[in-house]
Image (spheres, grey):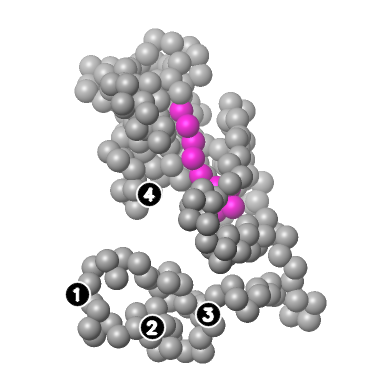
Amino acid sequence: MLLAKIRQRKKIALAVASSGIASTLLRGGRTAQSAFKLPLNLAHGDHPVCDISKGSGQAKVLQQCTAIIWDECTMAHKKPLEALHHTLQDLRSNNDLMGGSTVVLAGDFRQTLPIIQRSSPADELNACLKAWRYVKTFTLTTNMRVHLTGDASAATFSEQLLMSGDGKAPPDPNTGLIQFPHYFCNIVCSVDELKVNVFPDIHHNYRRHEWLCERAILASKMIASIY
């Protein structure tokens, strides 16, 4: 919605993401690595910058853009953000934060944080975007997909996932494992039963693209069917 509103006003809004899959979900989206020409050894530099020259077309876009929206930013190292900050200051001849441009970082810190090889938990936390002093965090608290559909089962599923992500789901006193209510998902006992539950009668339905798009096995080792 932010991208659409800015572009409706005939202004430039860049959409980037930390992963290729996430970038395909954004209209006109690209990976941050591609859009900003980020060097591969950013984590080892003290003053990281993007590999963009002032006379290039990318430089002109960054000079004129009103906003940059960076999705799935939580898995990114803070060094790329610092590189973008320094590059925008240089390209726009503006010493303000991000050269005066608005940068929106979207993501969920319950997901995977930056992975630092042979590091301690302190190193990983230091590499996280939250460790960058200029980042201000805003939290969205309403699941709009559940709110608009009014699906009670989807609301319960969402609440259970949040409890698990926040570490509030009570573990079983005997096993120490998190126990979900019986209505949380469908439990199967074998991979064959999982495939039948997720893709029933697939020999006749495999040509129906809409049917296939509505179901998937998220991980091969799951015992719960998601559809």
- The relative height of residue 103 versus residue 130 in the rendered view (above or below) is above
Q: Is residue 102 visible?
A: yes
Ranked by sequence position, the earlier of labels 2 and 1 is: 2
Q: Which mark is residue 195?
A: 2
Cα distance between the residues tagged 2 and 3: 12 Å
Above or below, comparing residue 8 to residue 154 in the picture? above
x, y (%) of residue 52?
30, 25
Residue 113 appearing in the image: no
Q: CA distance from mark 1 to mark 3?
A: 25 Å
Q: Position of residue 147 (x, y in %)?
A: 54, 51
Per the image, the residue denoted by label 1 is 207
Question: For the residue labelled by badge 1, is the local secondary structure a helix, a strand or a loop?
Answer: loop
Outermost residue to the front: 150
At label 3, which amino acid type do we have? Asn
152 drawn magenta: no
**How many angstroms separate mark 4 from mark 2 (CA)?**
26 Å
Q: Secondary structure at mark 4?
A: helix
Q: Earlier in the sequence, mark 3 or mark 4?
A: 4
Q: Is residue 105 magenta?
A: yes
Task: Decide which of 58, 66 is in the foreground and name it.
Answer: 66
Q: Amino acid at mark 1?
A: Arg
Point out the tag, 1 or 4, that comes first from the N-terminus: 4
Q: Is residue 162 above or below residue 200?
A: above
User: Over which residues does the magenta segment extend?
Assistant: 103-111
Q: Do the numbered discs 1 and 4 sit on residues whose CB atoms are within 8 Å?
A: no
For disc 3, the marked residue is 186
Tell me what residue is drawn at x 44 percent, y 17 percent.
99
Q: Nearer the viewer, mark 3 or mark 4?
A: 3
Residue shown at 41%/44% (left/top)?
Answer: 18
